Amino acid sequence: MKGSYLFLLFLAYQLKTTCMAARILVLSPLGPRSHINSFMPMVETLAENGHQLTVVTSSSPKTLSPNIYKIVVEELIEFVDVTWYDFKEHGIIFNSIGMFMFFRSTMTPAYEKFMANKQIQEIKQNKNYDLVIVDAIVNEFSLPLVDHLGIPFIFFDPGPGMFWSLAAKGVSHDYASIPPLLGSYSSQMTFFERMTNFLVTEGFLVLRKFYLLAALDQLAKKDFPVARAISEIERNAELTFANIHPASSWTRSLPPTFIPVPAMHVRPTMPLSQDFKSFADEAEHGLIVFTLGSNSQVSSMPVHIQEIFLRVFARLPQRIIWKWEMDSLYQLPNNVKMVDWLPQQDLLGHKNTRLFIAHGGLMGIQETIYHQIPVLGLPLGRDQRTLLIKANKEGYALKLEWEDLTEELLYESIQKIINQPSFKNNATRLSRLMHDELMPSRKVAAYWVEHVLRRGGPKHLQSKDMPFYQVYLLDVWLFLFVSLVFTMFASYKFGALILRRLTRSKLKTH
């Protein structure tokens, strides 16, 4: 009898899981490897919950789940594997123009190749999905397809809150306290920096809407004749998930439909292969890990900078694991191991690791915080400078510029971070903050995805869609200003009239 009861209970659970199972489409056709690594924990959690997911990318995600079907649009890999990084520092205006031109030159041809793919055409024709999750960075060209499917969709922003993602959900940009992603400002900005932050960001948004998105709208008409404007579609996202955490990003006020799901990719350390393990275990004075991430190549750095690193590493007692994509350099110091791939999180979590030398990408920053490792950052562009400025302010990192790099500066910076306990202590402090969470981020994301599936979208949480002049009360301030000017002018005229009357009265008396 007891066995029959347990069987019926199991059967009821399986039936419940089957009834709740949904078909979810995940679109990241132009997402680089870092984007894929960022959202795949959410995808795998949804798969564990019984949902069927189709993931569209330009490179295959690493997953063994039978509930995840992969569509690899190989025609788009040429737009993803591009050399965008730069060993020179540029200002916010140059960076913003560069990003805009990159988007403009990429998304138009990418759209055509995306829609020409046979599997994408099948998705268009069959319409057999319940929900779409869209990578919010450089994948806006896929939104006409999403609109055509006529189902709820959610944005996933793998960055620290890109300004167009914020604008689409009515999030305040907080220009006075949140520095621009593409600049080199801190949260303590001067008047000129705050003005530049406002003008450049708003200018980018205007150009994006009326130049970039408008061109994509025209292109999409041939495939989707009744498609809405992309700028309108993106405002109708049910939710936006963003890789935001106060330990790694500047804090800001957020509406309930803009949900932080930070650092989903971080994880406890796993055992190293024997080759890496032996090298790390025998690092008597500590281990340094050096990489510039998955979207750039250390081997592309100028020769004189390569020589600076070699000379400095030769002076150090620590061992160094250096990610290098080409043949090893000549005259390599005995304490340096060059590899074309490294298990980054497992090395950062090794007991002997003392320092991470990196470009300052968001995911790497979050991994160092999680594993309590200080950072020496050399940014290559995009949002890396502002992330390293934040890290420097928190006291667990130093930021250097490639153009200023000398042998002594690099050596002294490494010595300072390794020998001053404050860097390690601050990394530990932030790590405790990151570990202190009510629920893992991947489960938070899965909960809200299923909430949208159950409720058809959280309409009760949506912010009111208002034009920017109402959001910032510009019409109210203008009314008050005009009223004040009118009152002062009327008071002046009335006072002048009374004064003239009094003057005339005195003249008549005399």
Image (spheres, rainbow, N blue to C red):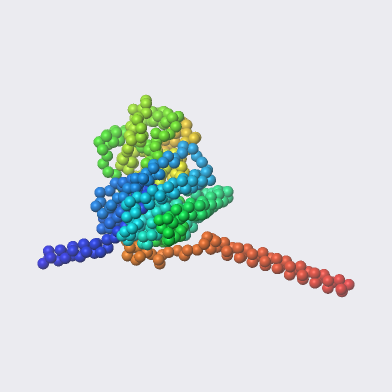
| Residue located at (25% from left, 36% from top) | 274
- The location of residue 445, given as percent across then percent down, is 34, 57
The front one of 198 and 408 is 198
Which residue is situated farthest in the right direction here? Answer: 510
- The location of residue 131, given as percent across then percent down, is 34, 59
| Residue located at (37% from left, 50% from top) | 116
Which residue is situated farthest in the top direction here? Answer: 331
The front one of 260 and 156 is 156
Q: Is residue 83 visible?
A: yes
Q: Is residue 482 above or below residue 111?
A: below
Q: Which quadrant of the view contains residue 376?
A: top left
Q: Which quadrant of the view contains residue 318?
A: top left
Q: Is residue 244 visible?
A: no
State the quadrant of the C terminus: bottom right
The front one of 384 and 300 is 300
- The location of residue 52, given as percent across then percent down, is 28, 56
Left-right relation of 187 to 285: right
State the quadrant of the N terminus: bottom left
Which residue is situated farthest in the front direction here? Answer: 222
